Amino acid sequence: MLSKLRSDIKAVFDNDPAARSTFEVVFTYSGLHAIWAQRVAHAFYKRKWFSLARFVSQFSRFMTGIEIHPGAVIGNRLFIDHGMGVVIGETCEIGDDVVIYQGVTLGGTGKEKGKRHPTIGNNVVVGSGAKVLGSFRVGDNCNIGSNSVVLREVPDNCTVVGNPGRVVRRNGERVGDRLDHTRLPDPVIEMFRAMQKEIDGLRTQVEDLRGPGHKGE
Ligand SMILES: CC(C)(COP(=O)(O)OP(=O)(O)OC[C@H]1O[C@@H](n2cnc3c(N)ncnc32)[C@H](O)[C@@H]1OP(=O)(O)O)[C@@H](O)C(=O)NCCC(=O)NCCS
């Protein structure tokens, strides 16, 4: 228990260059307070004391501006920076060493039942204002750009940006690069292909006009 608290505090120092002292971190980092409150709420939730769990969660939201459902499963060393406006849904699962910035929603689309919130892998950064909506997995070592809206599965080691979110980087390589010089279209070959198609068409027409039985030139 104590080692878990220590690793939560260490996660703040690892991810926030502005963190100065343990005293300051423990007493002023609302992301940390929200995570600790969620651990208490989750323990009540697991015992099926749902109302008490909800009460702790809502009190924490009132104090921190961060709403984490008591049912969410949170890994080790989660760091929520700034935090205001973060919403994490009931069936959300978060891996280890994840960083979440303010305004992030890990939610559902409103259509699903049962597991309806995302599963976030290990070592993922979810940028400010990003929305990850639905029951799918965001792989390990991914970056979700700020203000992205992610609606489908993200493989490991990817950067996703935009609305709807699209993978722009995978395993360190740019994806869909318009200036990928090894795959540039060759206009001369394209022209020859078009000419060949035209010639084949004309040949067929000439053979049809000459009628059956006519062979050769
Ligand atoms: C996505 C992010 C993690 C960068 O990841 P990266 O793998 O280094 O990606 P790059 O910076 O190489 O960007 C790749 C492409 O996505 C674009 N891009 C990056 N972030 C974007 C965003 N949030 N929205 C839209 N496009 C974005 C870049 O312009 C670049 O486009 P290009 O290939 O046409 O030049 C970073 O931009 C980001 O959004 N971090 C969140 C930080 C945050 O929320 N901070 C809050 C502090 S309070």
Image (spheres, rainbow, N blue to C red):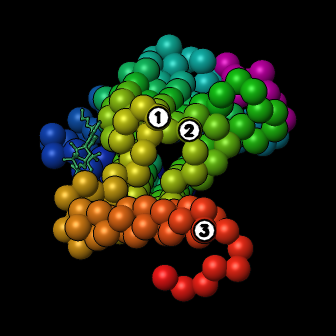
Whole-percent x, y for residue 115 in the image? 76, 42
Earlier in the chain: of badge 1 and badge 3, it is: 1
Visible residue check, residue 30: no
Residue underneath mark 2? 151
Visible residue check, residue 51: yes
Amino acid type, mark 2? Leu
Q: Which mark is residue 182?
A: none
Residue underneath mark 3? 210
Q: Which numbered disc, 3 or 2, marks the residue closer to the eye?
A: 3
Q: Quadrant of residue 171?
A: bottom left
Magenta span main SS? helix
Residue at the location (32% across, 35% down)? Answer: 146
Cβ of mark 2 under 8 A from ligand 1: no
Residue at the location (81% across, 33% down)? Answer: 113
Cα–Cα span, label 3 and label 2: 59 Å
Cβ of mark 3 under 8 A from ligand 1: no
- Residue lying furthest top in this view? 62
Q: Residues within 10 Å of mark 2 (few under 14, many from 20)?
A: some
Q: Which corner quadrant of the figure contains ligand 1?
A: top left
Residue 48 vertical position relative to residue 8 in the rendered view, above or below? above
Cα–Cα span, label 1 and label 3: 57 Å
Secondary structure at numbered mark 3: helix
Q: Which mark is residue 164?
A: 1
Q: Which residues are magenta?
A: 48-55
Cα–Cα span, label 2 and label 1: 7 Å
Secondary structure at numbered mark 1: loop
- Residue lying furthest bottom in this view? 216
Amino acid type, mark 3? Arg
